[in-house]
Image (cartoon, grey):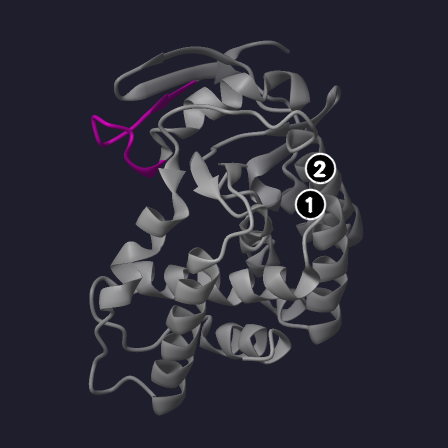
Amino acid sequence: MYGHLLKVYRRADRGNEAAGTGLLKLWQNRGAVRVLADAQNSVLTEWLEGPSLGDLARAGQPDLAIATLAETAQRLHRAPVIRTQGLRPLQDVFEPIFSSRFSPCCSSRLKNDMGRAIDLAKVLLGNQPTTVPLHGDLHPDNVIQTAAGPRVIDAKGYLGDPAFELANALRHPNGMSALVQQRSQIERCLKLYSEAMNVDTHRLAQWAAAKCALSIFWRADALIQTDREADLLHLFLEIAGQ
């Protein structure tokens, strides 16, 4: 079956995916969804028939899902590096977290872990070895397994350290928190993802902690109290040696 998918955004500027459409267009021959048209607040793409890699993981094939994700990321970032204007620097993405506020009922461990992760983010942002175009939200639920192969959707369009690209994937697949929080699973993913992106495993683990903290901040709506990923953040920091 062939068809189209129209995505209409609530915000006229497409919010945090504004820069992603152009990047998907440039990555079309590397496995990105085909963008047919885009307007100020909407994007028309081809319809993708098939499960997401997240669906495959939840159906009992997590190893296949993470291996395919790693291969997909490697294909997106193969040489030559795609250059495009208007991508959002990682510094801008993380800037709001540096003004984090904590509720009096926030646990001392979470407050301490958030502080450690925020300090870590500052260090990582300050010594990025290189900057490249980034999908920005590359995880199993943003890759569709079609008959023609994996297809990437919903790019944010960031610019920054390639070690950031699969950091968020360490928090996924959605709905599989027991697996995601297994140290052996984290270490397996770190090895696979760092090899795919040709980056340092330790730096990838550090970015995973920083990104987990950023997600906690986003969910907190200005005042951090508690969060379902508090334990995961603590584990990421331990593995990153922080």
> Tag 2, which secondary structure?
helix
Answer left or right for 217 relative to 230. Answer: left
Question: Can residue 176 be seen in this snapshot?
Answer: no
- Residue 197's mark? 1
Q: Is residue 11 magenta?
A: yes
Q: Amino acid at mark 1?
A: Met
Q: Earlier in the sequence, mark 2 or mark 1?
A: 2
Query: Residue 125: x and y, percent?
Result: 43, 57
Query: Residue 56: x and y, percent?
Result: 71, 44
Location of the C terminus (image quadrant): bottom right
Answer left or right for 139 relative to 16. Answer: right
Residue at 64%, 31% (x, y): give it. 76
Residue at 57%, 55% (x, y): give it. 167
Location of the N terminus (image quadrant): top right
Residue beneath disc 2 = 74
Proximity of marks 2 and 1: CB atoms separated by less than 8 Å:
yes
**Mark 1 burial class by Cα count in 10 Å: few <14, some 14-19, many 20+:** many
Q: On the image, which quarter does residue 220 sit in? A: bottom left
Q: On the image, which quarter does residue 157 sit in? A: top left
Question: Can residue 190 be seen in this snapshot?
Answer: yes
Q: State how many labels appear.
A: 2
Alpha-carbon span between mark 2 and mark 1 = 6 Å
**Mark 2 burial class by Cα count in 10 Å: few <14, some 14-19, many 20+:** some
Q: Is residue 201 above or below residue 148?
A: below
> Tag 1, which secondary structure?
helix
Q: What are the residue bounds of the magenta stretch?
A: 6-16
Q: Is residue 51 above or below residue 230?
A: above
